[in-house]
Image: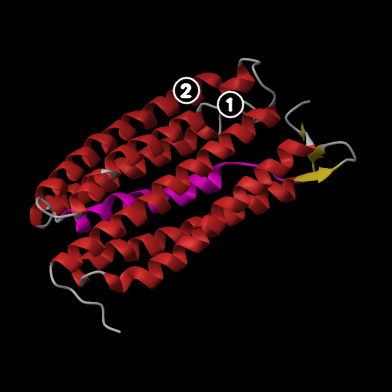
């Protein structure tokens, strides 16, 4: 099959994966709204930013799911690109990440107890590294194998540039979590907060893995259907882990800290 025709199974799995993605964000949106006031005011901005992230992810992942279902029509044996339809693109994900990534990175600063000049420094570095990582990756995805304008060299070049900023983010988040753990010494929240680091590394490394999935197509290892299922599954798993689970862990840590500091939830 060419890139304009995919199997019924591949079409349905991608549609279901994308639906799972925005449904998870919708459920998490409700969670963060309902639990925001379980935290002291100084920690609440972390939950507020999680709410913003969920709204952004919900809307843009819904748009991507619609893009997928609108692009193809059933032929009786498979799904083919609908005449006059736009090609399916990961662009919606990148637009979502352009909003979400700086917020995801900044929100941890409130729970880590970082303030003053250090807070401002980290905020600028996180925002700069995060946006540049997403923008360069967004440019690169236009050249990925399977697209009409595919160009392996440019796809890898832009992916490499994006990875440089990706590594910068990992270095910064490692520093922040280590500083946060020191600030939480003696608190039960320290263990929960410390566990964010392995979660962060695992979930964030899924993104470059998903970016490289089209190599399966380029190398003849798999057809378009398999490679796009693998890519969308990996991206969605990464989104849920890096936004939902990450946000829940931050909220759990801040709730523990609030309770230890004498905060009581008003009925």
Task: Determine whether, in the image, residue 84 is placed left or right of residue 172.
Answer: right
Q: Element type at marker 2?
A: helix
Using the image, determine if residue 250 lies above or below residue 174. Answer: below
- Residue at position x 24%, y 41% in the image: 173
Viewer-side residue, 16 vs 79: 16
Q: Position of residue 121 (x, y in %)?
A: 15, 48
Magenta residues (range): 85-112
Please name the predominant secondary structure of the magenta segment in the image. helix
Mark 1 sits on what residue?
Answer: 214
- Residue at position x 52%, y 36% in the image: 234
Q: Position of residue 207 (x, y in %)?
A: 45, 35
Task: Determine whether, in the image, residue 82 is placed left or right of residue 267.
Answer: right
Using the image, determine if residue 201 lies above or below residue 104. Answer: above
Task: Determine whether, in the image, residue 1 is placed left or right of residue 121.
Answer: right
- Residue at position x 57%, y 34% in the image: 231
Using the image, determine if residue 124 lies above or below residue 52. Answer: above
Mark 2 sits on what residue?
Answer: 156
Q: Element type at marker 1?
A: loop
Q: Position of residue 115 (x, y in %)?
A: 11, 57
Count of picture labels: 2
Quarter placement of the C terminus: bottom left
Using the image, determine if residue 197 lies above or below residue 70. Answer: above
In reply to whether residue 97 is colored magenta, the answer given is yes
Dot 2 and dot 1 residues touching (CB under 8 Å): no
Would residue 55 be visible to someone looking at this image? no
- Residue at position x 32%, y 29% in the image: 164
Q: Quadrant of residue 228?
A: top right
């Amino acid at each position: 099959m060419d890139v304009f025709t995919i199997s019924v199974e591949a079409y349905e799995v991608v549609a279901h994966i994308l639906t799972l993605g925005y449904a998870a964000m919708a459920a998490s949106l409700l969670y963060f709204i309902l639990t925001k006031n379980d935290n002291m005011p100084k920690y609440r901005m972390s939950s507020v930013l999680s709410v913003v992230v969920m709204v952004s992810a919900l809307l843009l992942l819904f748009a991507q799911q619609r893009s997928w279902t609108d692009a193809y029509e059933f032929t009786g044996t498979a799904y083919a690109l609908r005449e006059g339809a736009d090609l399916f693109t990961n662009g919606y994900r990148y637009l979502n990440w352009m909003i979400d990534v700086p917020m995801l990175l900044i929100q941890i600063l409130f729970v880590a107890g970082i303030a003053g000049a250090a807070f401002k420094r980290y905020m600028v570095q996180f925002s700069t590294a995060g946006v540049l990582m997403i923008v360069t990756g967004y440019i690169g995805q236009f050249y990925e194998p399977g697209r009409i304008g595919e160009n392996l060299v440019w796809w890898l070049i832009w992916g490499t540039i994006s990875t440089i900023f990706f590594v910068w983010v990992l270095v910064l988040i490692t520093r922040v979590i280590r500083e946060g753990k020191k600030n939480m010494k003696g608190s039960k929240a320290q263990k929960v907060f410390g566990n964010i680091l392995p979660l962060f590394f695992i979930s964030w490394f899924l993104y470059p893995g998903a970016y490289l999935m089209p190599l399966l197509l380029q190398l003849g290892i798999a057809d378009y259907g398999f490679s796009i299922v693998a890519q969308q599954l990996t991206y969605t798993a990464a989104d849920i882990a890096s936004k939902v689970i990450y946000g829940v862990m931050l909220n759990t840590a801040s709730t523990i800290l609030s309770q230890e500091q004498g905060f009581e939830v008003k009925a």
